[in-house]
Amino acid sequence: MLSRKQTPSVSNQQCDTYAWFSQRAWVEIDLGALSYNVQQLVQFLSPRTQLMAVVKADAYGHGAVTVAQTVLQSGASWLGVATVPEAIQLREGGIKAPIVILGATHTPEQIHAIAHWKLQPTLCSPKQALVFSNILEEMNYDSPVPVHIKLDTGMSRLGTNWQQASEFVQLVQRLPHLSIASIYSHLATADSLDTTVMKEQHRRFEEAIAHIKAIGIQPPCLHLANSAAALTDPALHYDIIRAGLAIYGLYPAPHLQNVINLKPVLQLNARITQVKTISPGTGVSYNHQFIAPHELRLAVVGIGYADGVPRSLSNKMQVLIRGQRVSQIGTITMDQLMLDVSAIPNVQEGEVVTLLGEQGNERISADDWAEQLNTISWEILCGFKHRLPRVAVM
Ligand SMILES: *Cc1c(COP(=O)(O)O)cnc(C)c1O
């Protein structure tokens, strides 16, 4: 068994030039699942609400350009990134859709790039708005730049305090070279079972919008929801939802699993590079953190912490071979790790091991790793290094 999928196509944007079958380790991206997730989300939204696919951090490690192409074909209308270089990478990859930069931008270089590549920045403060307007004035830039006004309703991250929203919006509206494309905020606790803080943020957002309308400004477009909020309450959907995690097929919290069906997009695979028998008492890997209690068959796998397999999973993780779970043994090293494959007869060099994903009836999820590591699945997905090629399959 080389791979569970038959005809993988190597995406030229995200993968190196080696053929997929020669890889020692790779991240498999299921574009069919990605497309399915986007369609599930779009169907869940009312026709008024558009989907912004959040593709920051190289599309949560899935490969930004390939993901952007697929989500736009599947019903997303907007793309969200964190930084200017992330947005430029998409434009250079031929992506024409509106791209919102969700992070802060200030410098003349960033502002020039935003104008040149027709990107849409977030404006977080009156000071930043003035800098933008001044630099665009100096550039003699003729068409106005669409900007997204960020309000802080309780996340205490980017944005102007919601109580100063109407003054801020009024200032931006009067400044030359800027046109307000949307007003938005971000929720701090949308994945929590306790909705108290989220409801208060929602109330503050509504209050800010009411003040903006009271001074005679009709906001063109409003958005508040990330994946968790989108799955929690349609009242939070407004004109756009900004979904990251859900499009990659993971649930922001266990209690949201019944809302819509999602399929994990990313699978982490590697090949067995050597198989050997070790005798009882033999130490395995650095510092002999595993000692064979009896004779066992050991398989070496060509993936390690430099690829993004956390070293702190050493002696704790399982992987899938031929649809069966086997245990990882010894310390995970930079480029390689070891398995106890005694339970599987006649394991061959070259066989595929699935570290995350599905084989037969077994699945190991980023949520499993996250739980073991006391973190969240978002961090697991973003942790796979560029040494691993991204291989797109349909
Ligand atoms: C990253 C991000 C999102 C996406 O969050 P998910 O929980 O992955 O859906 C939405 N909005 C903003 C402002 C973000 O930074």
Image: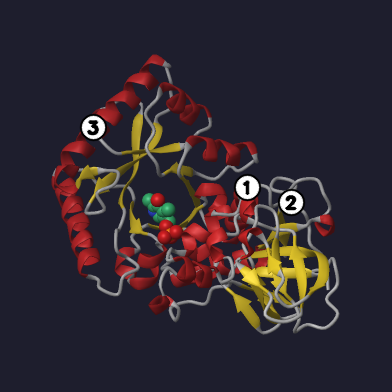
Dot in front, 3 or 2: 2
Which x, y percent locates residue 299? Answer: 77, 69
For this view, does 130 lie left or right of residue 204? right
Q: Is residue 4 visible?
A: no
Q: Is residue 127 visible?
A: yes
Residue 66: x %, y % from top left = 65, 51
**Residue occupied by mark 1:** 65
Q: What's the amino acid at mark 3?
A: Pro
Q: Residue at x 40, y 72 (%)?
A: 253
Crowd rating for badge 2 (residues with CA inside 10 Å; few <14, some 14–19, many 20+)? some
Residue at image location 22% in from the left, 59% down from the top: 201
* Mark found first going from the N terminus, 1 or 3: 1
Mark 2, residue position: 11
Quadrant for the C terminus, please.
bottom right
The CA distance from mark 1 to mark 2 is: 9 Å
Instruction: Verify CB contact (< 8 Å) between mark 1 and mark 3.
Output: no
Check disc 1 and report its element: helix, strand or loop: helix
Which one is earlier in the sequence, the residue at label 3 or at label 2?
2
